[in-house]
Amino acid sequence: MKKTEAGKQQFSAEKLIDAAILLIIVLSFALLIFQFHTSGIKTAGPAVNSFFILQPQSVTEEVIPEYAGIRRSYQFDMSKLPVSSARTRHFFVYLRHTIASVEIDGKTAADTGENRNVFHIGHTPGNYWLSVPIYDIYYEKPFSLTLTPVYHSVQNEQPVFYLIDREPLLNMIVLPKEMPMIAMSFFVITTGFFLMIIAATIGLDPQERERLLYLGAFSTAGGIWKLCGLSAATLVLDYTGQQKFIWNTGVCCYMLMLVFSLRHFAVLRSDDSSLTAKACCLLSAAASILLLVLQALNLAELHETVVWYGIGMAVLHLLALLGHKPNRDEILWLVPAFLSLAIDLGIYLKSGSISTAPVFMLWIILNLFIRGFGFLRMVIRRERELRIKDEELRGAKIQTMISQIRPHFIFNTLASVNMICEENPKRAAEIISDFSQYLQSNFSALATSELIPFSEEMRHVKAYLNVEAALYEDQLSVEYDTVFTAFRLPPLTLQPIVENCIKHGFGRDTSSLHIIIRTRQTGSGAEIQIEDNGPGYDPSPDGAIHVGLVNVKERLNLMCGGTLQLDTGSAGGTLVTIIIPA
C-alpha cells in the first residue's frame, strides 16, 4: 500500500510538471494570437492620414563641451498637416540616453534635462518615449526639438518622429515589431519564476535545489533585462510616469543574470573543484554592488561601466571554467551562453534594436526545457524509483526480522516456564510477563518504519534479557550504563545484537557471560556500545553472526544514516559500536 501511494504521489508530481509546461506554452501562444488579433482590429479603424511620420524641415548641429559633445536642433513645419477632428494627436519620439527639449512658439513644452526635477540614472534620462500633446492651435506655430546625446554610443542614432495617438502607436507600430521578443521575455520570466517556486517547495537534495533555483533566477533576470530594453515597455509604463526607472532595472537584472550564471556554473559539480567558480561568483557579486554604490554616489556611469562589467564577467566565467578540468555540463553552459550573447550584440549593433536579437532568449528557453523541466522530471522519476526500491527494501527487512524470531527460543522459554511453574510460580509469572512484553515489542517494531525513542528500545531489550537470564540462571549477567537516552533509533537495533552476544558468547572457555550496554552523547549525535566477555568476533565469511548484524547495519544506514562497527572488546570479547547522527 505504501509503495502504491508513493508511486501515485510521484506520478502526480511528474504529471503536474508536464501540465505546467503545456500550460505555459499554450498561454504564450494565446498571448501572441490575442495581441495580433487586437492589433488587427485596432488598425482597421483609423482613417487614412490618421498618423504621420514627420520629417524635420531643417537640422542644425552645435558642438558642446559636455555629454557626447554634440547637440542637434530639429525644426518642424506642421502647417500643411490636416488637423485631427477626432482626438488630440501626440508628438512621439523614442530616445536612448538623450536629453530632449521641445519648444512650441518659443515656449518650452517638454524638457528632460538635468535642470528639471526628473529622476535620472546618472546624467541620462534612460530609454524613453518623449510625448508632447499637439493641440489644434499648435499646427500653425513654430515647433522645434533639441536633442543632446549623453553618450558617444548613441550620438549617431537617427530618431523617428511620429504624430500619432498612443494606442495606434502601440498597436500599429511598436507591438507588431516587438511582440515576438515580448512573448519570449514573458515566457522566460514566468517559467524561471515557476522553477524557483518548484525548487523551494518540492523535496530535493541541496545541490539539485540550487541547480533549479539559480537556473530559474538566471532566466528570470535575463527575461526582465530583455523586456526592459524594448520600447513597448517604456511606452506602456509611460502611463504611470515611471518609465525612466526601466533602464536602471534592466541593467541591474543584466548584472544579476551574470552573477546567477556563475552561481549556477558552480553547482554543476559537487566536488571541491567548484571552489574557483564560487570565488568568481562572489567576486562578480561584489563588483555589481560596487558599481551600484558608485552610481548612487554619482561617481560612475552604469552605461559606460556595464560594458567593462560584461567583459570582466566573461573573464571570470573563463577563470571558473579553467580552474579545473571542465565537464560536459559546464562547457555546454558557458560556451553557448556567451556565443549567443555575442551574436545578439552583433545584431543589435547592426540593427539598433534589441527586438531583432532573439538568439540569447532562444538559448534560455532551450535551457529551461532541457536543464529545467527535463532535469526536474528526471529527479522526480529517480525519486519515485528510489521510493519504490526503499519500500521494497523495507519489506524485505521486515521479512528478515520476522525470520529472526527463533522458534527454538520460544520453545525453550515455554519449556523452562513449564518447569519453573512447579517450583516457583511467582518466578514463572515474571518470566511470562517479560516474555509477553518481548513478543509485543517485537511485533510492534515490525509494524513501524519510523525511528523510536531509545527508552522504548531498551524496554524491549530488558524484557528479552530477563527471559534469557531466567533460562541461563546465574550464567548471564547484564550491566547498564545508559546515561544518555535523549535520542531515537530504528526499532530492533539492540535486541538482535544482544541476542547475537548470547548466542555466540558461551564458548568452550566461557562459563558465564557478562554483557555491558553503554550510551554517551557525542558532538555529532549518540554512541551506543554493546560489549561482552565471550570468545570474540569471528570475521570469517562463514561466521554465523553476519546475517543479523548486516541487517541491523543496513537498517541503521537506511533509516537514520547511522553506522555499526565491530571490534575486539577490552576483555577479549566482542565490542559493537553504533553511531546515531543527531
Image (spheres, rainbow, N blue to C red):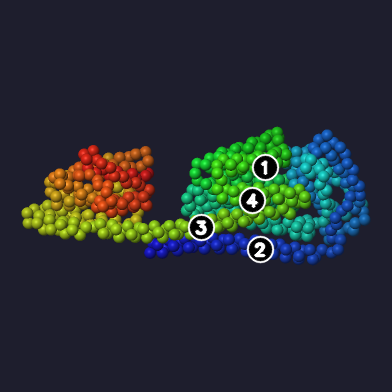
- SS state under label 2: helix
- CB atoms at circles 1 and 4 under 8 Å apart? no
Q: Position of residue 332 (x, y in %)?
A: 60, 51
User: In the figure, is residue 84 to the left or right of 33?
Assistant: right
Circle 4 residues within 10 Å: few <14, some 14–19, many ≥20: some
Say which quadrant the C terminus sits in.
Answer: top left
Q: Earlier in the sequence, mark 3 or mark 1?
A: 1
Identify the residue position indicated by label 4 in the image.
336
**What amino acid does circle 3 point to?**
Met
Q: CA distance from mark 1 to mark 4?
A: 16 Å
Identify the residue position indicated by label 2 in the image.
29
Identify the residue position indicated by label 1 in the image.
310
Identify the residue position indicated by label 3 in the image.
378
- In percent of the image, x 34 and y 56: which residue is there? 449
- In percent of the image, x 69 and y 37: which residue is there? 295
From the image, state whether disc 1 or disc 2 is nearer to you.
1
Q: CA distance from mark 3 to mark 1?
A: 34 Å
Q: Is residue 246 in sight in this rendering?
A: no
